[in-house]
Image (cartoon, helix red, strand yellow):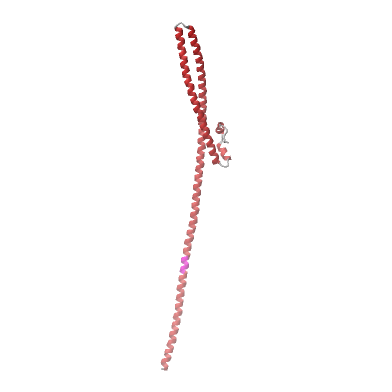
Amino acid sequence: MGIFSRFTDIINANINAMLDKAEEPEKMLTLIIEEMTATLVEVRSTAAKQIAEKKTVMRNIRAMESRVAHWQQKAELALNKGREDLAKSALVEKQSCTQKLTEFHEELGQFDQCLNALQLDSQRLQDKLTKAKRKQEAFATRQQSAEVRLKVREKAATNNIDQAISKFERYQEKIDRVEAQIEAYDMTSSKALDSQFRALENDENIEQALEKLKQKVANG
């Protein structure tokens, strides 16, 4: 079932209020535009039929004007020839054609009024449809903008994570370098201490060897 039941519903509708109440404004607006478009097609189709019928009436008017002129000439001819009876008959035909001509003109006036009203209605409906489409474009623009903002935020979040990981890795590298320096220092310090103890041991061995040599020379 359509949102609108007749043309006046569309013209008098407060689309903004309808969209404010709608759970899904975008879908509601799409339905409104579809119905407006269909109604506009109907209005234009009706106008086309009215124009075609108006052209028929205009052709009838031209034909009847020709018949009125024809019987006027016949009446004048008969009167000039002394045939008053024929002139009278011709005038009767002319009067009948004149009456029909009047009716055609009235019908033409009605078509003009109808077409003017259809033109006005068509323009009002077109204006309403244009506003609805602009609102639809605004919805689309807002949607695209929201998607862009979301992507930017997602990218920013990803960048923040990447930056945090990179920063952590840099700190880890610094810690590794410091630990390596400590290990190197400890290693070199330990070797230096061992060297000192070995030197002491060597000195003691030499002293003992020297004492033994002295004793050997003294006993010799």
Q: Position of residue 198 (x, y in %)?
A: 45, 80
Quadrant of the image containing the C terminus: bottom left
Residue drawn where x is 51% and y is 44% of the image: 143
Q: Which residue occupies the extreme top position in the image?
A: 82
Name the residue: 48% across, 22% down: 56
The relative height of residue 115 versus residue 164 in the rendered view (above or below) is above
Q: Does the magenta stretch include residue 26?
A: no
Question: Viewer-proximal residue, 68 or 26?
Answer: 68
**Can the viewer see residue 190 in this picture?**
yes
Taking depth in this image into account, of 171 and 43 the one nearest to the observer is 43
Residue 214, image x, y percentages: 42, 90
Q: Is the magenta stretch mostly helix, strand or loop?
A: helix
The residue located at (47%, 15%) in the rendering is 67
Q: Does the magenta stretch include residue 179?
A: yes
Image coordinates for residue 12, horizontal then vertical, percent: 56, 33
Quarter of the picture containing the N terminus is top right
Question: Toward the viewer: 106 or 212?
Answer: 106
Q: Which residues make up the magenta segment?
A: 176-181
Q: Is residue 128 visible?
A: no
Q: In this view, does 22 lie above or below 101?
A: below
The mark tally for this picture is 0
Closer-to-camera residue (114/220): 114
Could you tell whether 206 is left or right of 129 in the image? Answer: left
Image point (47%, 21%), residue name: 59
